[in-house]
Image (cartoon, helix red, strand yellow):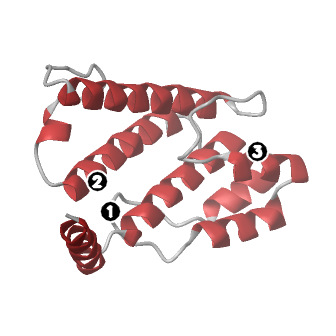
Amino acid sequence: MEKYVYFAAQLPLLFFDKETSFSTEEFLREGRKWLSDADLQILSAASLNKSQAEMIDPPVMREYKIYEHALRSELQQYRIARNKRQEYKPSLFPLSVLKEGNPLEVEKKLLRLRWQLIEELAFGHYADIEFLCLYYLRLQILDRLKKFDAEVGKEKFKTYTELAYEQK
């Protein structure tokens, strides 16, 4: 437990949609210095892309995964309803999150929802394995946001639309 305090104390503060010089790789590398193998395994398993709770998960990770599963289910239900030209009102977030803005803005809003939940889950956790798992999730969100590049996106869009046009 003492080692958690030293590890947590050296971590920079994270803010949504603000770049950090601390990457997920650096975080895990630093974690190897301070954590046991079992704790490092728990930490490494924390992922934004997983929505099924596992026995190894600390309680806050189970809560996060339950939310992530519900969020993905709501998105799926919304898309199914939209394809059938039916209305669907999600319960986890306002419909405006999905309807207002371009796909990039919608993705950022969904990442912000995840960030807000992580902030809520972090309350009361300041230097334990749960704090570190939630910190790692926030780093993953920032890494994902960093990958969004408008110019690259425009080029991909052009390429895909040109290919679709050529195939007609």
Q: Where does label 3 land, which residue? A: 42
Q: Nearer the viewer, residue 164 or 117?
A: 164
Above or below, 116 relative to 76: below
Left or right of residue 91: residue 123 = right
The x and y percentages for residue 52 are 62, 30
Q: Considering the numbered disc 3 on the image, is that residue within a helix, a strand or a loop? A: helix
Q: Quadrant of residue 95?
A: top left
In the picture, measured across the screen, residue 11 lies left or right of residue 18, that is right
Q: Residue at x 72, y 30 (%)?
A: 54
The single residue placed furthest to the right in the displayed view is: 37
Three-letter amino acid code of the residue under disc 1: Asp
Q: Quadrant of residue 90?
A: top left
User: Which residue is labeled 2 in the image?
Assistant: 108
Q: Quadrant of residue 125?
A: top right
Element assignment for label 2 = helix
Question: Is residue 9 rendered to the left or right of residue 119?
Answer: right
Disc number for residue 69? none
